[in-house]
Amino acid sequence: MFANFLGAIASILDIVLSLYMWIIIIRAIISWVNPDPYNPIVRVLVSVTEPVLYQIRRRLPFAMGGIDFSPIIVILAIIFIKRFLVQSLAQMAMQMG
């Protein structure tokens, strides 16, 4: 039963991380076209991503030529978490079951 629980957690975490990574990508692409800040979709994207991106910008305050590298760092962190944590949870679930 615990193996199924770990497998479910790994699957849900994988889906949530993938969805968040796509949200970060969409926000980065939309930022290239100077979006309307009052658009509801833009507001949702900013409210969901800005807390994480702000923390990265605050800790790594470099921007070369006006390019914001915080989305790239967040995407790399998500890929690392998916490769390390999610796969480890899935492997533990398979070994237990």
Image: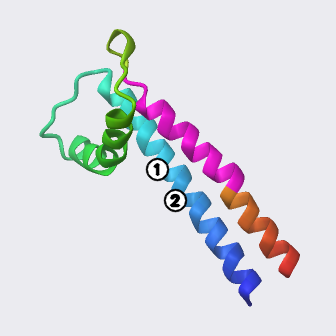
Q: Secondary structure at mark 2?
A: helix
Which quarter of the rendered picture does the N terminus lie within?
bottom right
Q: Which residue is depicted at the point 30% across and 45% down?
A: 45
| Residue placed most toward the observer, 29 or 65 | 65
Q: On the picture, is 25 further left or further right than 42?
A: right
Q: Are marks 1 and 2 in contact (CB under 8 Å)?
A: yes
| Residue placed most toward the observer, 21 or 72 | 72
In magenta, the rendered stretch is 68-84
Residue 78 magenta-drawn? yes
In the picture as drawn, the residue positioned furthest to the top comes out as: 65
| Residue placed most toward the observer, 72 or 4 | 72
In the picture as drawn, the residue positioned furthest to the left comes out as: 38
Q: Position of residue 71 (x, y in %)?
A: 43, 33
Q: Which residue is depicted at the point 48% across and 40% down?
A: 74
Q: Label 2 is placed on what type of residue?
A: Val
Circle 1 residues within 10 Å: few <14, some 14–19, many ≥20: some
Mark 1–mark 2 Cα distance, whole angstroms, equals: 6 Å
Q: Which residue is depicted at the point 49% across and 31% down?
A: 72
The residue singled out by tag 2 in the image is 16
The residue singled out by tag 1 in the image is 20
Q: Secondary structure at mark 1?
A: helix
Q: Quadrant of residue 38?
A: top left
Q: Label 1 is placed on what type of residue?
A: Tyr
For the stretch drawn in magenta, what is the main secondary structure? helix
Q: On the picture, is 31 further left or further right than 74?
A: left
Task: Please tell me how many numbered marks the rendered image carries.
Answer: 2
Q: On the picture, is 46 further left or further right than 6?
A: left
Q: Which mark is residue 8?
A: none
Q: On the picture, is 66 further left or further right than 76?
A: left
Q: Quadrant of residue 9?
A: bottom right
Q: Quadrant of residue 30?
A: top left
